[in-house]
Image (cartoon, grey):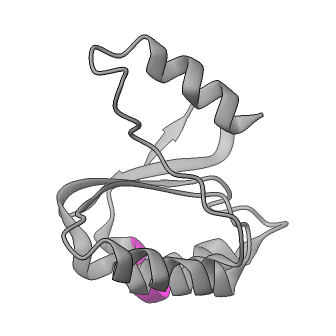
């Protein structure tokens, strides 16, 4: 379903003949390393974290950190969520919460985003 939605979205893009997304199934703690290896020149402009728990969030943050540029967008789905504290803990350990200027969606209290290096 997600792939179909992304295909529809891309159909309206001026460069619709070029696929600009890739969905990878599997354990993000493992697949991120392979993806980075397969894409050595990739710069991470946006990373969306909807893993809810500590280990994959921490593993992916640590893996992509060298590929983030000042201005990369980091989106977190369960930040400061009492039901899923692992995401917040991982973000704090890797990026230090007090180094981030967090922005929030008004109708989703646990969703937040930050611009890396801001």
Q: Which residues are magenta?
A: 92-97
Q: Nearer the viewer, residue 24 or 49?
A: 24
In-image side of 108 versus 48 (left or right):
right
Where is the C terminus found, in terms of image quarters?
Answer: bottom left
* Residue 73 showing in the rendered view: yes
Please report the residue visible at 85 percent of the width from the left and 66 percent of the height from the top. 83
* Residue 95 showing in the rendered view: no
Residue 43 pos. (x, y %): 22, 63
In-image side of 71 versus 11 (left or right):
left
Q: What residue occupies the far left of the structure in this picture?
A: 70
Q: Is residue 28 magenta?
A: no
Q: What residue occupies the far right of the structure in this picture?
A: 83
Q: What residue occupies the far front of the structure in this picture?
A: 17
Is 47 placed above or below 2 here?
A: below
Residue 82 pos. (x, y %): 79, 66
Image-quadrant location for residue 3: top right
Is 56 placed above or below 52 here?
A: below
């Amino acid at each position: 379903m997600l792939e179909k939605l992304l295909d529809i979205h891309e159909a309206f893009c001026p460069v619709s003949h070029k696929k600009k997304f890739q969905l990878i199934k599997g354990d993000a703690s493992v697949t991120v390393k392979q993806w980075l290896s397969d894409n050595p020149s990739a710069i991470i402009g946006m990373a969306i974290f909807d893993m809810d728990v500590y280990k994959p969030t921490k593993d992916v943050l640590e893996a992509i950190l060298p590929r983030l540029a000042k201005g990369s967008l980091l989106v977190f789905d369960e930040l400061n969520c009492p039901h899923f504290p692992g995401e917040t803990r991982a973000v704090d350990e890797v990026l230090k919460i007090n180094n981030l200027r967090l922005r929030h969606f008004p109708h989703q209290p646990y969703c937040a985003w930050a611009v890396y290096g801001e």
